[in-house]
């Protein structure tokens, strides 16, 4: 009996200690020199003036190539993705400082979910409107006025 209690105590303490162990984050998925950030660089233009240009920090890293690699130089990891993202954003300053989020549309979503749960058949916004006899009518808005027949 004593042997069973000692075995149980050893197993339970091992289980408790293993629960406290934290695994390190997987750094193998992200290269060490990759940066998702952007920075402003001063660049001299052809007329001699300097201007600030937004550049992905991933493109500033030097890609190390082996001496056996005789092909053209390669872009650092993440450089092409960050550059393409930079070309697609609406405002360039969003890359260095984001905008605050707008409030979530919780009321319409929860109302629709509650109507679904309750089994109510309310017309969807923008959809066709069905009368009580089942005939489909064209949706009307407040800006439309009916045409008078002559």
Image (cartoon, rainbow, N blue to C red):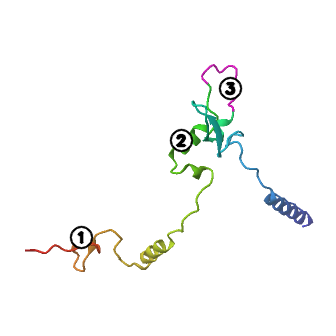
Q: Depth check: 85 or 112 in front?
A: 85
Q: Which image quadrant: the N terminus?
A: bottom right
Can residue 71 be found in the magenta stretch? yes
Give the percent coordinates (x, y) of residue 72. Answer: 60, 23
Examine the rendered structure and indicate whether residue 4 appears above or below residue 149: above
Q: Which residue is mark 3?
A: 65
Left or right position of 50 against 111: right
Q: CA distance from mark 2 to mark 1?
A: 44 Å
Q: Specify the farthest residue to the left.
A: 150
Tell me which residue sits at (92%, 66%) in the image. Answer: 2
The residue positioned 35% from the left and 76% from the top of the image is 122
Q: Secondary structure at mark 2?
A: helix
Looking at the image, do the residues carrying marks 1 and 3 touch, with CB atoms under 8 Å apart? no
Q: Is residue 106 left or right of residue 38?
A: left
Residue 63 picture quarter: top right
First-in-chain label (1 vs 3): 3
- Count of labels in the image: 3
Span highlighted in magenta in the image: 62-72
Determine which residue is flagged by label 2: 84
Q: Secondary structure at mark 3?
A: loop
Q: Could you say which quadrant of the image residue 77 lies in?
A: top right
The image shows residue 5, relative to residue 117, as above or below, that is above
Q: Which residue has dot 1 on it?
A: 138
Report the front residue among 79 and 67.
79
Q: Residue 96: percent from the left, percent from the top?
A: 63, 50
Sooner in the amino-acid sequence: mark 2 or mark 3: 3
Q: Are marks 2 and 3 in contact (CB under 8 Å)?
A: no
Foreground mark, 2 or 1? 2
Give coordinates of residue 6: x percent, y percent: 90, 63
Q: Quadrant of the C terminus?
A: bottom left
Instruction: Determine the secondary structure under disc 1.
Output: loop
């Amino acid at each position: 009996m004593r042997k069973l209690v000692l075995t149980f105590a050893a197993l339970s303490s091992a289980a408790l200690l293993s629960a406290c162990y934290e695994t390190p984050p997987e750094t193998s998925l992200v290269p060490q020199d990759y940066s998702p950030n952007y920075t402003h660089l001063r660049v001299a233009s052809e007329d001699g003036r300097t201007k600030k240009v937004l550049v992905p920090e991933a493109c500033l890293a030097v890609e190390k190539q082996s001496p056996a690699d005789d092909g053209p130089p390669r872009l650092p990891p993440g450089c092409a993705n960050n550059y393409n993202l930079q070309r697609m954003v609406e405002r360039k300053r969003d890359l260095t400082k984001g905008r605050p989020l707008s409030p979530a549309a919780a009321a319409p979503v929860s109302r629709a979910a509650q109507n679904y749960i309750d089994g109510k058949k309310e017309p969807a916004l923008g959809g066709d409107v069905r009368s009580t006899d089942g005939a489909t009518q064209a949706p009307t808005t407040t800006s439309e006025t009916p045409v008078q027949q002559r």
